[in-house]
Amino acid sequence: MSAVKKRLLLFLLSLGVVSGALTWIWFQDLQVRYAMLFRAPAQFVFRQLGIHKSGLLLVIEHFTNLIPFIALTVSLPGINLKRRLARLGLGLAVLAAVHFILIVAVSAVYNAYALSPTAYKYMFPLLTVNDALPLVLWFLLFSEEIIAMFRVKKRDAAVEPTP
């Protein structure tokens, strides 16, 4: 087995284990605790914007996008701890900001259109962007390391037989 295939296999194995563990922890307790972090700031914004009904329960399931971002970041090989933690922190801050914006935007749509087809027309793109964001962030923050994972290194090329 080539060195690149070994690195990829180890990455995927680590990704599966970390994702499974994070998912279990998330649904045990963290999902509700995380959502409650937004409650007071969201209520303040709702008062300023005249929003009377919160859409938090409509978006809470979409906060699980933290799991793939953390799992991808933790599982990616070849990054020193300080750099990994800095990028993880940046990515989590971006995701939290987007989650807050999502709560406010979905709440505004919910207040204007209830749960009508028109509401879903406006909510769907917001939720889709939110759900895809972890992968996009991971690529943006770790592009060099992702590319390096697939690169054949000189020492590996000397050992690998050519087909």
Image: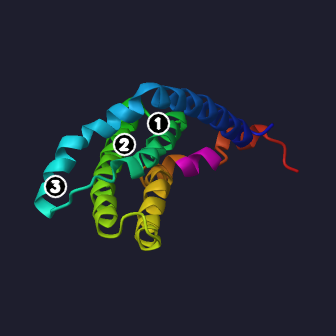
In terms of sequence position, does the residue under pointer 3 or pointer 2 come before the other? 3
Residue 20 visible in rendering: yes
How would you classify the magenta stretch by its main secondary structure? helix
Identify the image quadrant of the N terminus: top right
Gap in angstroms between the C-alphas marked 2 and 1: 10 Å
Gap in angstroms between the C-alphas marked 1 and 3: 39 Å
Q: Which residue is mark 1?
A: 79
Query: Toward the viewer: 59 or 14?
Result: 59
50 horizontally vs 125: left or right? left
Q: Give residue 57's position: percent from left, percent from top.
A: 38, 47
Mark carried by residue 87: 2
In terms of sequence position, does the residue under pointer 2 or pointer 1 come before the other? 1
Label 2 crowding class (10 Å Cα cut-off): few <14, some 14-19, many 20+? some
Name the residue at 54% across, 35% down.
Answer: 75
Asked if the residues shown at circle 2 and circle 1 are in contact, with their CB atoms under 8 angstroms apart, the answer is yes
Name the residue at 63% across, 34% down.
Answer: 16
Q: Which residue is mark 3?
A: 45
Secondary structure at badge 2 equals: helix
Q: Give residue 54's position: percent from left, percent from top.
A: 28, 52
- The amino acid marked with disc number 2 is Arg
Nearer to us: label 3 or label 2: 3
Query: Toward the viewer: 97 or 45?
Result: 45
26 horizontally vs 105: left or right? right
Magenta span of residues: 146-150
Gap in angstroms between the C-alphas marked 3 and 2: 29 Å
- The amino acid marked with disc number 3 is Val
Where 19 sits versus 134, above or below? above
Asked if the residues shown at circle 3 and circle 2 are in contact, with their CB atoms under 8 angstroms apart, the answer is no
Query: Toward the viewer: 71 or 125?
Result: 125
